[in-house]
Image: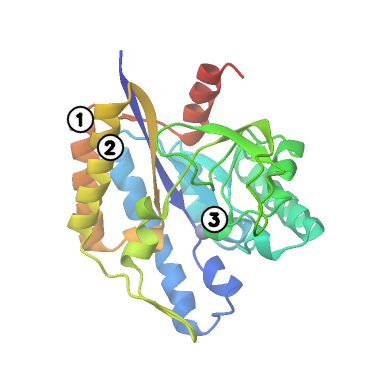
Amino acid sequence: MPRHIVCLTFDFDTQSGFIARGMTTPTPLSRGEFGLTGARRILDLLQANGIRSTWFIPGFTIESHPAACAAVVEKGHEVAHHSWAHVPPANQSRAEEEADLMRANTAIERLTGKKARGYRSPSWDLSDSTIGLLIAHGFLYDSSLMGADYWPYRARRGDRAELGKPFVRGEETALIEMPISWSLDDYPHFEFVRTPTTVLPGLQSARVMMENWLDEFRYMKRHVDWGILTYTMHPFVIGRGYRMLALEDLVEKLAAESAVFMTMEDAAREARERMGI
Ligand SMILES: [Zn+2]
């Protein structure tokens, strides 16, 4: 029996990403605060469709907006790890990365009663230490890499990439990688961001983007018997009214195409069983 799984995932950053980039004036902070409104809308949409999803919540958001995070838990969604301060591990020393990882896990344990089973790095940039730290701290899966589209794989550590030398694959681990893609992330499609060095234009048509996202599912359905497709969204981004309508439409069309909606933890467990790990 073919089985096509969809993981709807929400990175509940609120203000953390702006603060991590030094954008602490009132307007960028308010932009992150809008995520609280977006989260309420998303929770209502998921409940109306009987869908469980995964929320990657920084410790910052848990400690700054406890009621909004409690609502995610009450509605039966998975809470996963997304750092404490939303600083990409690639910008941290190993000790800094581990301290942040443990601090966020303590916040998650207070919120949900258990430590996170899954991890997604801020801005999708792991350090050389990350995979080892996730294994040491008992994680089941990571969701930060882009080496596949429809099938999870074993995360590796110790890959070696040097200019002028062939690539050397590192050791495969038991950590399940649940791959992602910027093409399936709402942020670059929608957000207008201006910094001193770059402009992200964003502001694309929500309907067109959702059409692309649906085609990604249709392609998976046509070409593999079993697969997992992960969509990544941010409440402060997808929570605008016209984008919510487009998301509602996507969810209905995916359901009509027999998508099986699962939390990432459940999907990772199913993947692990299939891999015989
Ligand atoms: Zn994030």
Q: Quadrant of the C terminus?
A: top right
Residue 139 as seen in the image, left or right of residue 47: right
Residue lying at 18% horizontally and 46% vertically, measured from the top left? 249
Front-most of 151 and 206?
A: 151
Reading the image, the residue beneath label 2 is 217
Q: Amino acid at mark 3?
A: Trp
Q: Amino acid at mark 2?
A: Phe
Q: Earlier in the sequence, mark 1 or mark 3?
A: 3
**Residue 45's spot in the image, x, y percent?**
29, 45
Task: Give the vertical position of 253 relative to 166 (above or below).
Answer: above
Callout 2: 10 Å neighbours few (<14), some, many (20+)?
many
Q: Earlier in the sequence, mark 2 or mark 3?
A: 3
Front-most of 99 and 204?
A: 204
Residue at the limit of the structure toward the right, as seen here: 95
Front-most of 251 and 177?
A: 177
Task: Give the vertical position of 116 relative to 10 (above or below).
Answer: above
Q: Are marks 1 and 2 in contact (CB under 8 Å)?
A: yes
| C-alpha gap between disc 1 and disc 2 | 9 Å
| C-alpha gap between disc 1 and disc 3 | 30 Å
- Secondary-structure class at tag 3: helix
- Secondary-structure class at tag 2: helix
Picture quadrant of residue 209:
bottom left
Residue 8 as seen in the image, left or right of residue 146: left
| C-alpha gap between disc 2 and disc 3 | 22 Å
Callout 1: 10 Å neighbours few (<14), some, many (20+)?
some
Reading the image, the residue beneath label 3 is 124
* Disc number lying in front (1 or 3): 3
Q: Are marks 1 and 3 in contact (CB under 8 Å)?
A: no
Q: Is residue 206 visible?
A: yes
Q: Quadrant of the N terminus?
A: top left
Reading the image, the residue beneath label 1 is 257
